[in-house]
């Protein structure tokens, strides 16, 4: 085609303006109304020492008073309390699951303190995987996978404890960690900045991955990026309302003044609330599903023998793997059956030999006893014969004596 031809063709194409609309511009609204109908769910794990302020902070975050018993310092092991609440704000429903550690950091030997936490996170992944693998899946399944772990750091002002490092190192590939400096009202402003830097450098030098607020979103990227630089958030919790001027605010009342929880100059509570609930809750859920759960699923399926490529590096389908596994299993069953049969036959043979040996032994014993008995009989018969001979001799002697006696008597009478 010559350029001239192209130009004429372009001119001949008519452009029509749309009359009315097609309707797919409304797709986001469909999603919104569906989500509103279904409600949302969010699962938070709070890890921190007993009395560090976990319950108070959760209550403050959700502006509620979630019933909770004071935890004791005398648990022999670390445990987890799981509580699920149905919350509502305007017409948005939220099924909130809060999992809190109990007895964390209270034992003298802290070696296995993080294990119950790992086990719990894995158990939720496993439950989800099992649900996914079911033939008949429940579409009302309550997904209990942990979306975020709020890790409460003691406000020591020095550095992280070895338990903090150990726990975070062991869970950072399984859950989104947001580190928090708890009870930040107990650390001065200057010390707090130094403490934050120290914590971050310790996390980096120990290769611990914490959750980063996503920066690739045009609308919230910039805010998220500046918030990433403010981690760990220094938070203060309170469920009390105190009077400041003419207003009632959530805060903590001290002899020297009032700490306002929701005042950004006093602490990072609002930053946490915004980042966690208003801006990044969906991202936390997405990261949990597409990265953390995916890793668990990948490892688990691989351990079960599933793979995406065969030994020749060619793609292999689930069906092929299943067939191969089935054959492998069938072969294994056959081998085991053969093995069992062999073992059984060997046992039968061994028993037969043992029976034969026992029978022979009994026969020998019988022969031996029989020969002894025969000897006894012969001995007795010999004795009997001797006795009979003796009896015959005796009878003969007796008869002779009687004859002699009779003769003697006759002779006396004659005389
Ligand atoms: P949990 O065992 O970690 O759940 O701790 P709680 O939330 O039950 O808090 C234990 C105590 O610490 C309570 O008396 C709270 O009032 C207090 N507390 C909670 N948060 C803060 C805080 O940010 N600063 C101070 N100073 N005290 C707090």
Image: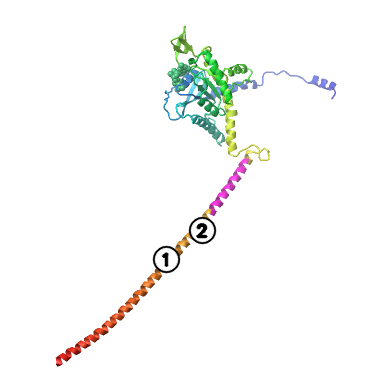
Residue 83: where, in percent of width, then height?
47, 26
Q: Quadrant of the C terminus?
A: bottom left
Magenta span: 321-342
**What is the count of numbered marks?**
2
The correct choice, above or below, for 264 with respect to 177 in the image is above
Residue 403: where, in percent of width, then height?
22, 88
Q: CA distance from mark 2 to mark 1?
A: 24 Å
Contact? badges 2 and 1 (CB < 8 Å): no
Mark 2, residue position:
349
Q: Which mark is in front, 2 or 1?
A: 1
Q: Quadrant of the N terminus?
A: top right
Residue 44 seen in the current view = no
67, 300: nearer the viewer: 300
Q: Residues within 10 Å of mark 1 (few under 14, many from 20)?
A: few
Mark 1, residue position:
365
159, 132: nearer the viewer: 159
- Asked where in the image residue 365 lies, by quadrant, the reply is bottom left
Labels 2 and 1: the sequence-earlier one: 2
Q: Residue at x 46, y 64 (%)?
A: 360
Residue 330: where, in percent of width, then height?
58, 47
Q: Residue at x 27, y 85 (%)?
A: 396
207, 31: nearer the viewer: 207
Magenta span: chief secondary structure = helix
Q: Residue at x 60, y 28 (%)?
A: 291
Q: Residues within 10 Å of mark 2 (few under 14, many from 20)?
A: few
Residue 362 seen in the current view = yes
């Amino acid at each position: 085609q010559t350029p001239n031809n192209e130009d004429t063709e372009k001119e001949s194409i008519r452009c029509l303006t749309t009359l009315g609309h097609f309707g797919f511009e409304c797709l986001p609204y469909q999603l919104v109304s569906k989500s509103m109908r279904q409600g949302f769910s969010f699962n938070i794990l709070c890890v921190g020492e007993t009395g560090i302020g976990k319950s108070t902070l959760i209550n403050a975050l959700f502006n509620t008073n979630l019933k909770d018993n004071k935890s004791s310092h005398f648990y022999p092991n670390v445990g987890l309390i799981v509580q699920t609440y149905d919350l509502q704000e305007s017409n948005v429903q939220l099924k909130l699951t809060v999992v809190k550690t109990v007895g964390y950091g209270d034992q003298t030997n802290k070696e296995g303190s993080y294990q119950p936490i790992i086990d719990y996170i894995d158990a939720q992944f496993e439950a989800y995987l099992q649900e996914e693998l079911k033939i008949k899946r429940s579409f009302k399944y309550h997904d209990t996978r942990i979306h975020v772990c709020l890790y409460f750091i003691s406000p020591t002002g020095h550095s992280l404890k070895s338990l903090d490092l150990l726990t975070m190192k062991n869970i950072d590939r399984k859950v989104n960690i947001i580190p928090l400096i708890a009870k930040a009202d107990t650390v001065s402003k200057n010390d707090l900045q130094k403490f934050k830097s120290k914590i971050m450098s310790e996390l980096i030098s120990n290769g611990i991955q914490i959750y980063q607020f996503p920066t690739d979103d045009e609308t919230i990227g910039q805010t998220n990026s500046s918030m990433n630089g403010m981690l760990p958030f220094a938070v203060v919790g309170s469920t009390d309302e105190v009077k400041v001027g003419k207003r009632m605010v959530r805060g903590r009342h001290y002899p020297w003044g009032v700490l306002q929880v929701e005042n950004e100059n006093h602490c990072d509570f609002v930053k946490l609330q915004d980042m966690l609930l208003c801006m990044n809750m969906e991202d936390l859920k997405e990261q949990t599903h597409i990265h953390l759960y995916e890793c668990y699923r990948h490892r688990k399926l691989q351990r079960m023998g599933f793979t995406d490529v065969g030994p020749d590096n060619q793609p292999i389908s689930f069906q092929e793997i299943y067939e191969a596994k089935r054959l492998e299993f069938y072969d294994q069953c056959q081998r085991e059956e053969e093995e069992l049969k062999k073992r059984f036959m060997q046992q039968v043979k061994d028993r037969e030999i043992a029976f034969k040996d026992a029978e022979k032994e009994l026969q020998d014993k019988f022969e031996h006893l029989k020969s002894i008995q025969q000897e006894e009989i012969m001995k007795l018969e010999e004795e009997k014969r001797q006795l009979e001979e003796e009896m015959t001799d005796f009878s003969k002697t007796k008869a002779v004596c009687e004859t002699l006696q009779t003769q003697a008597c006759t002779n006396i009478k004659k005389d």
